Image (cartoon, rainbow, N blue to C red):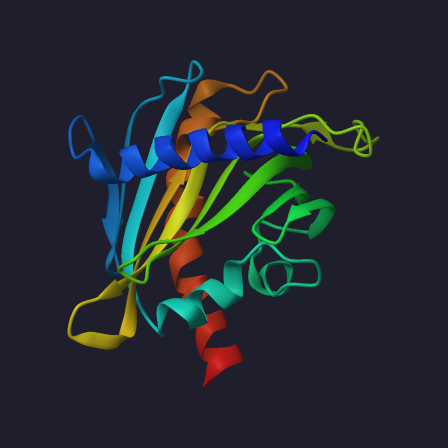
Amino acid sequence: MDVSWATQESEAVAEKVLRYRRDESGWKKCREGNGVSVSWRPSEEFPGNLYRGEGILCGTPEEVWDCIKPVAGGLRAKWDDNVTSFEIIQNITDVLCVSRTATPSAAMKLISPRDFVDLVLVKKYEDGTISSNATHVEHPLCPPKPGFVRGFNHPCGCFCEPLPGEPNKTNLVTFFQTDLSGLLPQSVVDSFFPRSMAEFYPNLQKAVRKFHH
């Protein structure tokens, strides 16, 4: 994969995801509870929704990041029920890679196993925030695989943000806009994402406690 193209593309995605983070307009809350709020607005990228999750976790941004960072043999597949496997297809730089994520069947088997091939950029901001920024990409080493429907992540990511005055807490803001493809009823998709995003937070909290305390 061309390094200069990948670098430009991933920086453009990171700018988009940062814009989602800063733009407070047009979000409609669809789920709230246990300190986690999930909202949505129509996607500008595809005929679906952009989802935003937010919640505060116990653990430093580095500890939270350690449980979700995109690395080979990382912790994510160990604790996240929505990830059956995660692999790095190509390391482009030390902060940029192409990954493949496989997900299990979901929504009482209405959603069959999916896989996603993404260009992922890790960014660190001056205030101590650590972010991942991803979008779907094609890669010659990762053609469609039997048994998986290839889904497409449009610009998405997360921000592990320090909380001023609370050094052992993290504000985690997540963005998803995923085309699951495969002719799913829209109602299945619309109920799946808010629920799985709401479950992501307590599961991640358990993982931070397990691996870092």
Q: Quadrant of residue 29?
A: top left
x and y percent of residue 20 in the render?
29, 34
Is 191 placed left or right of 112 in the picture? left
Which of 145/186 is in front? 145
Q: Quadrant of residue 60?
A: bottom left
Is 116 placed left or right of 176 in the picture? right
Residue 193, placed above or below residue 188: below
Is 109 placed left or right of 24 in the picture? right
Residue, far front: 4
Which of 89/212 is in front? 89
x and y percent of residue 100 in the render?
69, 42
x and y percent of residue 191 in the render?
40, 33
x and y percent of residue 21 in the render?
27, 40
Which of 47/134 is in front? 134
Is any atom of residue 39 visible in this view?
no
Residue at point 71%, 49% (across, down): 88
Residue 178, placed above or below residue 120: above
Residue, far bottom: 213
Residue 209, placed above or below residue 188: below
Q: Quadrant of the N terminus?
A: top right
Residue at point 45%, 19% (across, down): 186
Is any atom of residue 74 visible in this view?
yes
Is 125 placed left or right of 206 in the picture? left
Q: Quadrant of the C terminus?
A: bottom left
Figure label count: 0
Q: Quadrant of residue 34?
A: bottom left
